[in-house]
Amino acid sequence: MSGEPPIDHPRIRHAAIPDDAWLVVRGIASIEPETSRRQAELFRRRFEEWGRFGLSAFYARSDDEVLDIGEDRLEAFATLFVYRLADVIDAGLRSYRHSGARM
């Protein structure tokens, strides 16, 4: 184990996610509906001090980018969910800019 202190909050992107972005979320909800819920609860436990639930996602701006993410980054998942960022925000959820390759 390294001597680095544990991370008590997720890394946040410094660049804004474009308003027209699509969020690509991994999952197998068609097989096991509780997958996203468990991911959100694990996020909350991992970052307890932050006090929020969360899901990791990538963002894309075209069909080709969604396909690239699915083939290159999330190939282990049989199901991906794609949501428009605007719809996520309209539903009352908040987007934090995770420091992944795209989100």
Image: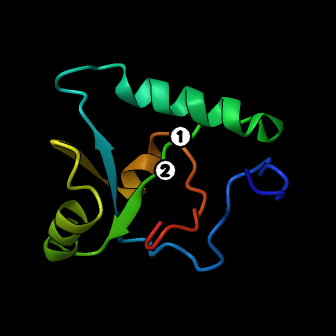
Query: Label 1 belongs to which residue?
Result: 92
Q: Position of residue 98 (x, y in %)?
A: 57, 62
Query: Label 2 belongs to which residue?
Result: 89
Q: Position of residue 45 (x, y in %)?
A: 68, 29
Q: Amino acid at mark 1?
A: Gly
Asked if residue 18 lies left or right of residue 7, the reply is left
Asked if residue 30 lies left or right of residue 60, the reply is left
Asked if residue 45 lies left or right of residue 82, the reply is right
User: Residue visible at 85% across and 54% down?
Assistant: 5
Which mark is on residue 18?
Answer: none
User: Residue visible at 37% across and 50% down?
Assistant: 87
Q: Position of residue 12 (x, y in %)?
A: 66, 65
Q: CA distance from mark 1 to mark 2?
A: 5 Å
Vertical placement of residue 65 versus 81, above or below: below
Residue found at the far bottom of this picture: 15
Vertical placement of residue 58 versus 92, above or below: below
Residue 30's quadrant in the figure?
Answer: top left
User: Residue visible at 60% across and 37% down?
Assistant: 43
User: Residue visible at 45% across and 25% down?
Assistant: 37
Nearer to the camera, 56 or 71: 71
**Residues packed near mark 2 inside 10 Å, few (<14), some (14 to 19) or many (20 plus):** few
Asked if residue 51 lies left or right of residue 92, the reply is right
**Residues packed near mark 1 inside 10 Å, few (<14), some (14 to 19) or many (20 plus):** few
Q: Amino acid at mark 2?
A: Ile
Nearer to the camera, 75 or 55: 75
Q: Position of residue 2 (x, y in %)?
A: 76, 56
SS at mark 2 in the image? helix
Residue found at the far front of this picture: 1
Q: Are marks 1 and 2 in contact (CB under 8 Å)?
A: yes
SS at mark 1 in the image? loop
